Amino acid sequence: MKHNIVTFIAVTVFALSGIIFWETGFAWLVLSLVAVIYFAILAYGSFKIQANYYFTSIHKGKRKSVALTFDDGPDEESTPKILQILKDKNVKATFFVIGKKAEKYPELIRRIDEDGHTIANHSYSHNYLIAFFSTKRLKADLVRCNEVISGIIDKSPLFFRPPFGVTNPRYATVLKELKLCSIGWSLRSLDTRAKNKYQLISRILGVLQKRDIILLHDNRSVTADSLEDIIEHCVQKGIKIEPLPRLIDKEAYGKKPDNF
């Protein structure tokens, strides 16, 4: 784990700096600089999931195609529109669902599954403060999400995406205990900020590459409005859209473990 290595180096440098500079009058300045650098690295590692700082997430595919992934659903208005487009275009996607929303809209979860898409864990609460949850509370949250999903489709997801893409050592512990695979992304669509569909389409197609895992949200109307054009442009560019499990060569579901 990169975090352990960085912490070891920081503690060592901190101790040596204290010894070396103690008599110079610059000790506190040097120690403060070491501390600032260390916490800056922690912040970067926490907010940049691609850094794989606390644990390893999957951000790219193994095949020369791309995968569509949707976060924060299901949504009673946008998700059905997205599902219809995916069905019409014969495209399979992965939905990282919020447990409490899945609980509220079980029929949408069943429809996602029946249409052949993958359903994955995006936490139960999607709480803004989830990064500050204790290990016990975080585990309970992820377990509850999987319980809701498996109660609806009788399948236990193995894929998980941290809310907001924020990571920390507690996630590392919980994911290992629950045997969940963390999935990041290589292309962030920024559909939560897009003012219109043309801005979103331009953003995606301007940087799209083979092996990309594309991050979208199925609770955004602009995403639903843009999806058909995005898929068509991929077809025109000769870029195949495949299910995430096939792209990364990982099983999406597993047997229900004792933890759940």
Image (cartoon, grey):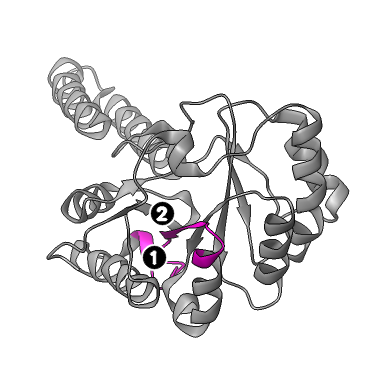
Pick the front one: 242 or 10: 242
Q: Amino acid at mark 2?
A: Pro
- Please tell me whether residue 67 belongs to the stretch shown in magenta: no
Is 75 drawn above or below residue 206 in the view shown? Answer: below
What is the x, y in percent for residue 61? Answer: 48, 31
Instruction: Assess whether residue 124 is covered by the magenta stretch.
Output: yes
Q: Is residue 215 left or right of residue 260?
A: right
Q: Is residue 127 above or below residue 135?
A: below
Q: Residue at x 22, y 59 (%)?
A: 255
Q: Nearer the viewer, residue 247 or 99?
A: 247
Residue 142: image quadrant is bottom left
The answer to whether residue 204 is left or right of residue 73 is right
The spot of residue 24 in percent (x, y) is: 23, 17
* Disc on the earlier residue, 1 or 2: 1
Q: Which residue is mark 2?
A: 162
Secondary element at image label 2: loop
Identify the magenta region: 113-131
Front-most of residues 104 and 236: 236
In this view of the protein, can residue 192 be seen by the observer? no
Which quadrant of the figure has residue 239?
Answer: top right
Which residue in the protein does label 1 denote? 123
Query: Residue at horizontal 80%, vertical 37%?
Result: 233
Amino acid marked by disc 1: Ser
> Quick check: marks 1 and 2 in contact, CB under 8 Å?
yes
Q: Is residue 244 visible?
A: yes
Residue lying at 81% horizontally and 59% vertically, measured from the top left: 225
Tally of numbered tags: 2
Q: Residues within 10 Å of mark 2 (few under 14, many from 20)?
A: many
Q: Quadrant where the N terminus lies?
A: top left
Please provide percent x and percent y for residue 127: 43, 70
Task: Label 1: state its secondary structure.
Answer: loop
Work out how far the residue at label 1 is from the one at label 2, CA to CA, in angstroms: 7 Å
